[in-house]
Image (cartoon, helix red, strand yellow):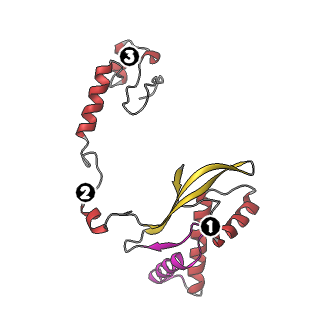
């Protein structure tokens, strides 16, 4: 299971047209990036056509592209731009299933018109500081991970020089990540 912004199995008319064109052109199921570039090209062409080819005025061209984004039917489904210029679009929950002898992403749920803020109020969300090494604070997580690793006795020396000086081979030096099983370090990894 996963989440996607587009799936070849979407049953909207714009996606069905795109899929026919793309499969005929590529001879295989297209990727997400093919769908996005197809959309982008259609928006630019629609904008240029609406301006009768007079695309030299940047402000008019950008306004025409923004109109096209919201009015040209898209393989991904409906798209609106928020006041910040970011897309608000459907998010599809998919499950990989076998259909016709091929693995496909089958849409099992749609979250309609999801904004970059999800369910948060933009004003509240934007009050938070930007992500950095210091924010959000994770001292407790870091301290717990370090304590867990050092108590296990399977820590990897912090530098290549310390690693060589430890006399441990790559096969006996193990990761002690608290989120996954211990795995051997491969010689040459930093």
- Residue at figure coordinates x 40%, y 25% from the top left: 175
Nearest-to-viewer mark from 3 and 1: 1
Closest to the observer, 115 or 33: 115
Q: Over which residues does the magenta segment extend? A: 55-81
Q: Which mark is residue 164?
A: 3
Q: In this orientation, which residue lies closer to the viewer: 58 or 3?
A: 3
Disc 2 secondary structure class: loop
Mark 3 Cα within 10 Å, few/some/many (few <14, many 20+)? few
**x and y, in percent, of residue 60 in the image:** 47, 84
Measure the alpha-carbon separation of dots 2 and 1.
36 Å
Q: Nearer the viewer, residue 166 or 1?
A: 1
Percent x, y for residue 90?
Answer: 50, 65
**Secondary structure state at the residue bearing disc 1:** helix
Viewer-nearest of discs 3 and 2: 2
Going from N to C along the chain, the mark reached first, 3 or 1, is 1
Give the secondary structure at mark 3.
helix
Q: Which mark is residue 129?
A: 2
- Relative placement, left or right, of 11 versus 148 is right
Residue designated by label 1:
38
Quadrant in which the C terminus is drawn: top left
Which percent across, then down, holds residue 85? 41, 72
Q: Is residue 106 above or below residue 144?
A: below
Along the viewing direction, whichever of 44 and 77 lies nearer the viewer: 77
Which residue is outermost to the bottom? 52
């Amino acid at each position: 299971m996963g989440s996607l912004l587009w799936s070849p199995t979407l049953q909207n008319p714009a996606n069905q047209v795109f899929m026919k064109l793309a499969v005929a052109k590529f001879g295989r199921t297209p990727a997400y990036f093919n769908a996005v570039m197809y959309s982008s090209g259609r928006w630019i062409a629609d904008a240029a056509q609406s301006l009768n080819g007079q695309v030299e005025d940047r402000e008019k061209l950008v306004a025409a592209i923004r109109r096209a984004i919201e009015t040209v039917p898209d393989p991904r489904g409906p798209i609106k731009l928020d006041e910040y210029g970011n897309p608000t679009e459907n998010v599809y929950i998919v499950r990989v299933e076998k259909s016709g002898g091929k693995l496909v992403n089958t849409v099992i749920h749609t979250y309609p018109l999801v904004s970059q803020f999800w369910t948060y109020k933009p004003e509240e969300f934007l009050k938070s500081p930007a992500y950095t090494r210091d924010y959000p604070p994770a001292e407790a997580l870091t301290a717990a991970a370090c304590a867990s690793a050092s108590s296990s006795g399977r820590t990897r020396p912090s530098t290549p020089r310390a690693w060589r000086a430890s006399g441990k081979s790559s096969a006996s030096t193990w990761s002690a990540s608290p989120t996954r099983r211990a795995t051997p370090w491969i010689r040459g990894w930093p």
